[in-house]
Image (tube, rainbow, N blue to C red):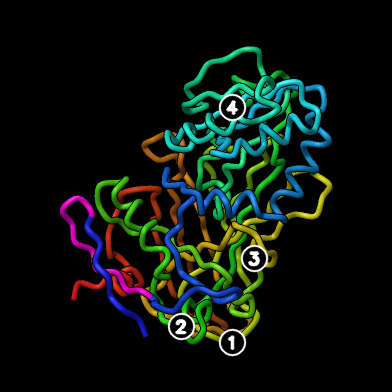
């Protein structure tokens, strides 16, 4: 069963379907995606600083790259986590940059209490507009989204490589890839309503307040059932932070259906490497703060069987802020019976339509 709540956003009353059941370990939950927006609070920071799978990879990279070098930490957060860890790994100086005002002021208070405070410089602002010298040898930036590029990593780190790093400087993480597989939304939330987790409502409110009106926000699935995947997973977005890094890209791939069911969209998830030769973090199969993003494509679920193929195109282009990408997905389902079914979705970082797809009409009912 679900319940309906009301949010107020700049004169708009928004009705939201909510799953009132409390979240529990391993239970799937539907949230709005949160990492792309300046709404971080103590809870969101804590989920990152306690993420073992994430932290062990970043720490290993800093242990190898930071000693004796200058390190730039973009998006340092209120805990100055990677600036602190860089110094502890042997960096001679760390420059920590934070754009969110509340996080910056908390970070400043935390810095004053650190033994390493004389080796860390904290700046407030966007790294893409700040000027500073000398240049860094290493840039560490945990601005990777559950959809790899969604937090603007490509644009921010392209700028960092061009303006803030010495020639041959290194970026941590090394590589991020978004993979996609065919799914049916109801299978990702078995036995549960398609409704937002009640604990997510304050974040949905904050995002709508930040933008000034409601819009069809991307849908984050926590703890999705991996046996709900109807196809193999294939890369649809590749970010090589120490190689050819593109701020806009397009990929077409074929997802082979491997079991019978119904498909209405795709689930995307993150693979992340902090060093080139390590086992990647797999956000779908490991316990980490990164979740998966569900994109609806077809207005109604379409039956599929092994042998069917979902041809998926994913394109990204920078939004009007020049940092965060807008995504566009197009799909053609080719069945073994010779039929074709077409679907698409525009998923901008902000703005765009509201209640345009049946999934969003169900999540945000008018009555």
* Spot occupied by residue 299 in the image (x, y as percentages of width and height): 36, 74
Q: Please, is residue 93 above or below residue 185 in the view?
A: above
**Residue 320 included in the magenta stretch of the image:** no
Front label number (1 vs 2)? 2
Which residue is the site of mark 1? 260
Give me the residue at 62% from left, 30% from top. 113
- SS for tag 3? loop
Front label number (1 vs 3)? 3
The residue most toward the front is: 113
Horizontally, residue 76 falls left or right of residue 327, namely right
Which residue is the site of mark 4? 112
Q: In which quadrant is the C terminus drawn?
A: bottom left
Q: In which quadrant is the N terminus drawn?
A: bottom left
Sequence-earlier tag: 3 or 2: 2
The residue most toward the left is: 11
The residue most toward the top is: 133
Give me the residue at 56% from left, 72% from top. 182
Which residue is the site of mark 3? 284
- SS for tag 4? helix
Which mark is drawn over residue 192? Answer: 2
Label pair 1/3, CB-CB below 8 angstroms: no
The main secondary structure of the magenta stretch is strand
Judge the density around disc 3: few (<14), some (14-19), many (≥20) Cα neighbours within 10 Å. Answer: many
Label pair 1/2, CB-CB below 8 angstroms: no
Judge the density around disc 4: few (<14), some (14-19), many (≥20) Cα neighbours within 10 Å. Answer: few
């Amino acid at each position: 069963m679900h319940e309906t709540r009301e949010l107020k956003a700049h004169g708009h009353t928004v009705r939201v379907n909510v799953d009132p059941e409390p979240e529990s370990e391993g239970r799937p939950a539907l949230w709005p995606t949160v990492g792309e927006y300046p709404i971080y609070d103590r809870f969101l920071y804590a989920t990152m600083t306690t993420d073992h799978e994430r932290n062990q990879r970043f720490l290993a990279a800093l242990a190898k790259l930071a000693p004796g070098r200058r390190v730039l930490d973009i998006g340092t957060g209120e805990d100055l986590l990677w600036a602190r860890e860089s110094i502890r790994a042997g960096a001679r100086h760390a420059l920590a940059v934070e754009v969110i005002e509340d996080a910056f002021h908390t970070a400043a208070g935390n810095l004053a209490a650190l033994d390493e405070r004389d080796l860390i410089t904290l700046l407030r602002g966007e790294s893409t507009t700040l000027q500073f010298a000398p240049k860094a040898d290493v840039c560490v930036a945990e601005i990777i989204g559950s959809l790899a590029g969604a937090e603007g990593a490509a644009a921010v780190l392209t700028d960092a490589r061009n303006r803030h790093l010495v020639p041959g400087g290194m970026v941590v993480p090394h590589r991020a890839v978004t993979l996609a597989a065919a799914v049916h939304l109801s299978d990702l939330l078995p036995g549960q309503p398609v409704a937002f987790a009640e604990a997510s409502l304050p974040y949905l409110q904050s995002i709508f307040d930040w933008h000034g009106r409601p819009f069809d926000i991307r849908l984050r699935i926590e703890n999705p059932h991996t046996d709900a995947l109807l196809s193999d997973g294939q890369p649809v977005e590749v970010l090589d932070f120490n190689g050819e890094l593109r701020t806009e890209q397009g990929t077409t791939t074929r997802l082979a259906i491997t079991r019978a069911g119904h498909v209405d969209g795709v689930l995307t998830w993150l693979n992340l490497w902090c060093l080139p030769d390590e086992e990647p973090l797999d956000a779908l199969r490991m316990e980490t703060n990164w979740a998966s993003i569900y994109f609806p494509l077809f207005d109604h679920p379409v039956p599929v069987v092994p042998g069917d193929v979902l041809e998926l195109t994913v394109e990204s282009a920078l939004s009007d802020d020049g940092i965060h990408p807008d995504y566009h997905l197009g799909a053609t389902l080719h069945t073994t019976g010779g039929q074709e079914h077409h679907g698409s979705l525009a998923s901008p970082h902000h703005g765009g339509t509201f209640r345009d797809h049946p999934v969003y009409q169900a999540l945000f009912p008018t009555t």
